[in-house]
Image (tube, rainbow, N blue to C red):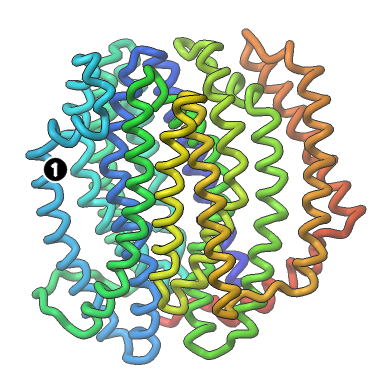
Amino acid sequence: MAFFRSLSTVTGLTLLSRLLGYARDVFIGSTFGDSGVSDAFFVALRLPNVFRRLFAEGALNSSFVPIFTEVYEKEGKDKALRFVGLVFSTLAVILLLLVGIFECGMPWVMSIIAMGFKSDMDKFNLAINFGYLTFPYIFFIALASLCAGVLNSLNRFFAATAAPIILNLFAILAVVFYSTHIIQAGYALSLSISLAGIVQFLWVFAACWRANVPVRVTRIQMTPKLKLLLKRMLPGIAGGGVYQFNLLISDMIASFVPMAISYLSYADRINQFPLSLIGIAMGTVLLPIFSRQVQGNRHEEAAYMQNRALQFSFVLTLPASTALAIISLPIIVTLFEHNKFTHEMSINVAQVLSILSFALPANVVVKILSASFFANGDTRSPVKAAIVSMISNIVFNILLFQMLSYLGIALASTLSSWINMTLLFYWLKKKERLHFDDRLKKTFPLLCLASTGMGIFLWEASTILLPYFSGHFLRSLMSLTLLISGGLVIYLLLLKLTKAFTYKEFSQAMHRAQKDSEVIKI
């Protein structure tokens, strides 16, 4: 079925991308160790990532996809393509100005977001130089994301979802080639980010032409559709800016503790793994479907899909969150503890991961609920929730950092994620756009019970196997595989006993999504 194929495509390619992303961070950790070069690189990478998530993955796509879908289906392909060209040209001009401003002001920018580095001027200067090399990435990746939005609107997910694989491959090759020279490896890694951005753009740009939806540069003019897009984007930019401002605040505080930025980044890499597979994949596939259902006034179908998306996400996120919290140290030791990545670093990263893992269910649900808001053209409510989340994150950061150092930053992020999710839940219920059906109400406590049972097993088993996680990669890998396999078997047995999830209902959901995920004939 089309929906299942789309979800499988996004999930499978995202899995490959995240595996390569993990490999990238393993090479970074084992090459740079606790030298501080990794801190400088991760801060430099934060800048283009902030604007990537702001322009590319946030406000732009969430506002662009519903409008493009509406124009394509109601006004025809030619007008839809003219709209794409107009948005592309406008975005390119904005991005050129943005890159120019930040390249000129990089030392000033770093003095703000990495002010803690000033006690080590070598690290501070590295962050500035790395920033010069990484920031042009935003120009290419934002334009690539627009092309990806066009492809996703037409249920063509392969090229767009495969693009991040290019970035990770470039980064891995850069580190491996210069692995014996730490500083040179840092420069090569930073340069590889922007080079990968160029290739990613060319990849999806060509995919649009192959799909018979060519993206062309056009004369910029303020049309009603462009005004509508900008109007919808502004709240999204504000909301995304709020979240990204949160990350910058966290980096700013963490920069005062040596290696704290790296610890948070390594832990986030593992925590983002299930989030990407479940939340981002669900959000990417559901937004076009929700948009068509809402525009067709088929609100019962939209409500059904929303409930099933929530149920299926809980099936995956509750046990994933439990496992990451309980066996974080075996995971980090096995995956990262090589060469210059010490056991002390493993312990510190594992502590951060245990805290961040509790935010996983909330972050996935936010992706699903946001798709519902965006499909209805409501970009204001997520912004309001993000603002409250930002304020709470700043307050929690200030209070908890004093008591828990960088662990307080991770806890602040987790608490603010749950606040964000709670507000979205509340507002959707208030607008009567969220109705929990009987199946979801029945399965949620059963899924919690199954995850708890699996957690008890993992706790006991990890206590027994912990001595085997040291010194030898293959032994650690076999022990971790045994742990995860045993936990998975226990969880599946408990699902079977409680009937909290069945293949039949999954198949039914896929069948009902079929009619809204047929590829548009082009």
Helix, strand or loop at mark 1: helix
Q: Which residue is mark 1?
A: 102
Judge whether 124 appears above or below 339 on screen: below
Look at 19% across and 30% down and name the residue there: 111
Name the amino acid, label 1: Phe
Judge whether 224 appears above or below 410 on screen: below
Please identify the quarter of the rendering in which residue 106 is found: top left
Near-viewer residue (362 or 490): 362
Residue 230: image location, x then y, percent: 24, 72
Q: Is residue 487 left or right of residue 71?
A: right
Look at 42% across and 30% down and name the residue there: 24
In the orientation shown, which residue stands out farthest toward the top?
Answer: 471
Look at 35% across and 12% down and name the residue there: 35
Q: Is residue 422 left or right of residue 339?
A: right
Observer able to see residue 22: no
Near-viewer residue (167 or 220): 220
Q: Is residue 510 left or right of residue 428?
A: right
Please identify the quarter of the rendering in which residue 128 is found: top left
Near-viewer residue (192 or 98): 98
Q: Is residue 101 left or right of residue 71?
A: left
Residue 251: image location, x then y, percent: 35, 33
Task: Identify the image quadrant of the C terminus.
Answer: bottom left
Residue 50: image location, x then y, percent: 31, 46
Look at 37% across and 16% down and name the residue there: 32
Observer able to see residue 482: yes
The 10 Å Cα crowd at callout 1, few under 14, some 14 to 19, many 20 or more, is: some
Task: Identify the image quadrant of the N terminus.
Answer: bottom right
Judge whether 114 appears above or below 309 on screen: above
Residue 365: image location, x then y, percent: 58, 58
